[in-house]
Amino acid sequence: MWPSEKRTRDTAAVLKLDAETICPICLERYPVGTIVKDYPYCPDCSSEGMDFDVETFSSYMARNTEADFDALLKHWDQAEGFRPEYKAAKRQRIVDLQALKAASL
């Protein structure tokens, strides 16, 4: 006979970050508790299985300067081989981060 109660996965072992995070690949921001610490995965750029460190949004913004965002934007504008939609979305994210950094100074 089948068990009468549905079994559920133990979620206590899953450590979710308690701060807003940012994907270092596509620069998408995620709210608190969205990204799992031990197995980072970005649903926006499908970065599952890639080896990258999850970084909190505040530390990412503190680490980068306006000049860093300018250089990133120049580099991204020259990048080739990406779908136009993805390229435009990431470019807009860089511009938004650049404006946010300028406003915080």
Image (cartoon, grey):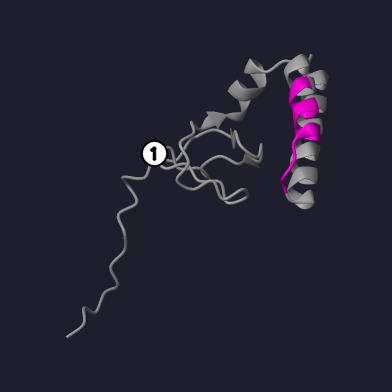
Residue 36 point in image, percent of width and height:
45, 42
Give left or right: position of 93 versus 58.
right
Residue at image location 59% in from the left, 35% down from the top: 20
Residue at image location 76% in from the left, 21% down from the top: 71
Looking at the image, the residue that sits furthest to the front is 81
Amino acid marked by disc 1:
Asp
Residue at image location 66% in from the left, 41% down from the top: 28
Location of residue 73 (image quadrant): top right
Location of residue 23 (image quadrant): top right
Residue that badge 1 annotates: 38
Looking at the image, the residue that sits furthest to the left is 1
Placement of 57 over or under 1, stated as above or below: above
Image quadrant occupied by the C terminus: top right
Give left or right: position of 64 versus 91.
left
Along the viewing direction, whichever of 100 and 66 lies nearer the viewer: 66
Magenta stretch: dominant secondary structure: helix
Give left or right: position of 43 versus 90.
left
Segment tinted magenta in the rendering = 71-82
Residue 89 point in image, percent of width and height:
77, 45
Along the viewing direction, whichever of 68 and 9 lies nearer the viewer: 68
